[in-house]
Amino acid sequence: MEKKIFSGVQPTGNLHLGNYLGAIKNFVELNNDIKNDCIFCVVDLHAITVKQDPNILKNNTRETVATFIASGIDPKKSIIFNQSKVKAHSEAAWILSCTARTGWLSRMTQFKEKAGKDKEKASVGLYSYPVLMAADILLYDTTHVPVGDDQKQHLELCRDIAQKFNNDFKVEDFFKVPEPLIQKEFSRIMSLKDGTKKMSKSELSDLSRINLTDNADQIINKIKKAKTDPLPMPTSKDELENRPEAKNLIEIYSSLSGLTLEKSVIEFSGKNFSKFKESLSQVLVDKIQPISKEIKKLLSEKSFLDKILKEGCEKADKIASNKMKKIHEIMGF
Ligand code: AQP
């Protein structure tokens, strides 16, 4: 079956190893399969749910496109565009916000985490963000959505919204109910400073993450300083359960080296962390450095990146406006 793939990344800077292993690596594999129709969106409307500097946002949008291409996404095969330029996203989000129930949104754990203790001060957009995400996905008759594990709940909400809309307006199958594509293993990469917190762009300490623009020295330094525990390297997979930092680092190693988790544990069983960290730095440098160099090169070709976005927007707009027309008919507008 042909898969229709849609996924988005926020242009909020500091794209990191978690974004790569949890999402972008998967985008590249899907892009390489000729049976798939892929759309990868720079979700700038999502980014403004928290305060953004307009000039930095513009640069981060280009950097996200550069990261897609540097990681291996081919803009000739996949549509790459930015969300704000395709008006149907905002319009569909409003319509779907009348289908979604407040009770559903109140259960979203990401809002609770991001809004923190002072929910009253969080933007309305941060609260309704998952409805916009549902609009993004549903406008393109998406069948599969590759995301990291942290987006699973938002995807379930998207499925609920699609089903309720189809039922409410008696339009069976109008919105396709999409399947999440979450990698079975290593779908949540954790902070290098705290193995219980996810690696994140907005974490203040840069030492908590490997950025896709880091050079070899920065990677080696961050791995040297990564938190571990006082014990030697684990001797079995079961031991990892109570050792979050060791688990995270060995999972990163396993994911990048292509070795299974069992084999990775055996390779370093009982050894010092320092020996393991040398090998981990090596696989990271081998993987990240070519991407980082290519991102820097592409960033000096602004007109090339802008052209990709412009062409992508035109293609996306055609598909989304067509769906929007049908939504208008269904709604009685
Ligand atoms: N730590 C992670 N492990 C695995 N996957 C991850 N993703 C993000 N962090 C991890 C996946 O990356 C894709 C794009 O994410 P996003 O741009 O929508 O932003 P996010 O999830 O909000 O990323 P951050 O880094 O966590 O940003 P902040 O700090 O703002 O919260 C998604 O598919 C996501 O699952």
Image: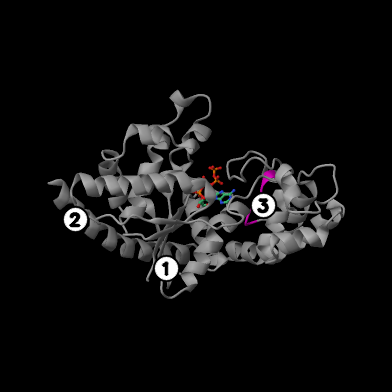
Is the CB–ligand 1 distance for label 3 below 8 Å?
Answer: no
Instruction: Please state the horizontal and vertical placement of residue 64, each as a whole percent of the image.
Output: 51, 56
Q: Earlier in the sequence, mark 2 or mark 3?
A: 3
What residue is shown at x 47% (from left), y 48% (from top)? 152
> Three-letter amino acid code at disc 3?
Ile
| Element under disc 2 | helix
How far, Cα to Cα, is label 3 from label 1? 26 Å
Q: Position of residue 249 (x, y in %)?
A: 72, 52
Give the crowd class for mark 2: few <14, some 14-19, many >=20 residues within 10 Å. Answer: few
Q: Nearer the viewer, residue 115 or 309?
A: 115
Magenta stretch: dominant SS? loop
Q: Is residue 94 magenta?
A: no
Q: Are marks 3 and 1 in contact (CB under 8 Å)?
A: no
Magenta stretch, residue numbers: 208-213
User: Which residue bears the numbered disc 3?
Assistant: 210
Q: How is the image coloured?
A: one colour
Asked which quadrant contains residue 294, the reply is bottom right
Within 10 Å of disc 3 (Cα), the crowding (few <14, some 14-19, many 20+) is: many
* Residue placed under numbered mark 2 in the picture: 325
- Measured as percent of width and height from the top left, residue 4 is found at 37, 64
Measuring 48% from the left and 40% from the top, which residue is drawn there? 52
Secondary element under disc 3, as helix, strand or loop, is loop
Residue 16 visible in rendering: no
The residue where tag 1 is placed is 78
N-terminal-most mark, 3 or 1: 1
Q: Residue at x 36, y 49 (%)?
A: 159
Q: Is residue 49 above or below residue 212?
A: above
- Amino acid on which disc 2 is placed: Lys
Q: Is residue 229 left or right of residue 176?
A: right
Image location of residue 269, percent across then percent down? 83, 57
Q: Amino acid at mark 1?
A: Ser
